[in-house]
């Protein structure tokens, strides 16, 4: 008789009903945890701050690299000195790209800030070079006054050596 009771439709209906009720309460509980837990986690300060700074650094790198490459490829840099300096900046960007490719995921916030600052300097240098202003400037140096002063001193010094 016990075997017949286990195989009856009533037992099967109760088993399915209890399973459905259990799954329903589990889903409601999971939704409650998600509804309360996610806003609490997101509201914490600095949760995504490091990832945002990393992405901003990568965006700045891409902007500087694309702008400098465009200027060099289109020959928009007006003079040879500025073009040579732009090639130096491009070489530095290439070295930095290799470093970022290998280590971008493991950078600390201080390292991200340092690279960001360096890229900002490269960006200002790129803008400066596009207008033709270079960091190295030819100096007009006339050595004549200096040489005349030194010649008199040297003459006096050699005279003292020769005739004490």
Image (tube, helix red, strand yellow):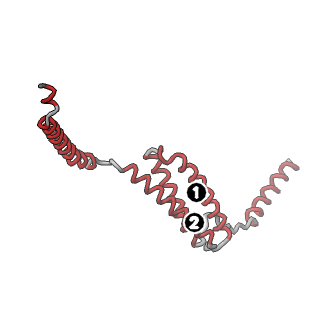
Q: Residues within 10 Å of mark 2 (few under 14, many from 20)?
A: many
Rendered location of residue 27, percent (x, y)? 20, 44
Q: Nearer the viewer, residue 75 or 158?
A: 75
Cβ–Cβ below 8 Å for labels 2 and 1?
A: yes
Q: Nearer the viewer, residue 157 or 145?
A: 145
Q: Residue at the location (61% across, 67% down)?
A: 134
| Quarter of the figure with residue 141 | bottom right
Q: Residue at the location (33% across, 47% down)?
A: 47
Distance CA(mark 2)–CA(mark 1): 10 Å
Report the residue marked by disc 2: 68
14 vs 152, left or right, is left
Query: Of the residues under marks 2 and 1, which one precedes in the sequence?
Result: 2
Rendered location of residue 137, percent (x, y)? 64, 66
Rendered location of residue 149, percent (x, y)? 75, 61
Q: Is residue 60 above or below residue 25?
A: below
Q: Quadrant of the N terminus?
A: top left
Q: Secondary structure at mark 2?
A: helix
Q: Is residue 142 above or below residue 113?
A: below
Q: Is residue 56 above or below residue 31?
A: below
5 vs 105, left or right, is left
- The numbered mark at residue 93 is 1
Rendered location of residue 104, percent (x, y)? 49, 48
Q: Secondary structure at mark 1?
A: helix
| Quarter of the figure with residue 138 | bottom right
């Amino acid at each position: 008789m016990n075997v017949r009771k286990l195989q009856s439709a009533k037992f099967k209906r109760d088993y399915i009903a209890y399973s459905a009720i259990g799954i329903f309460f589990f889903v409601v509980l999971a939704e409650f945890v998600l509804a309360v837990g996610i806003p609490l986690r997101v509201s914490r300060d600095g949760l995504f701050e490091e990832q945002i700074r990393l992405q901003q650094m990568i965006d700045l790198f891409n902007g500087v690299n694309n702008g400098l490459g465009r200027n060099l490829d289109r020959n928009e840099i007006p003079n040879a000195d500025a073009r040579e300096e732009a090639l130096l900046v491009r070489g530095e960007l290439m070295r930095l790209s290799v470093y970022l490719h290998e280590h971008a995921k493991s950078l600390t916030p201080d390292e991200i800030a340092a690279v960001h600052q360096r890229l900002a300097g490269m960006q200002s240098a790129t803008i400066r070079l596009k207008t033709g202003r270079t960091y190295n400037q030819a100096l007009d140096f006339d050595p004549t006054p200096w040489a005349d002063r030194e010649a008199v001193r040297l003459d006096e010094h050699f005279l003292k050596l020769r005739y004490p």
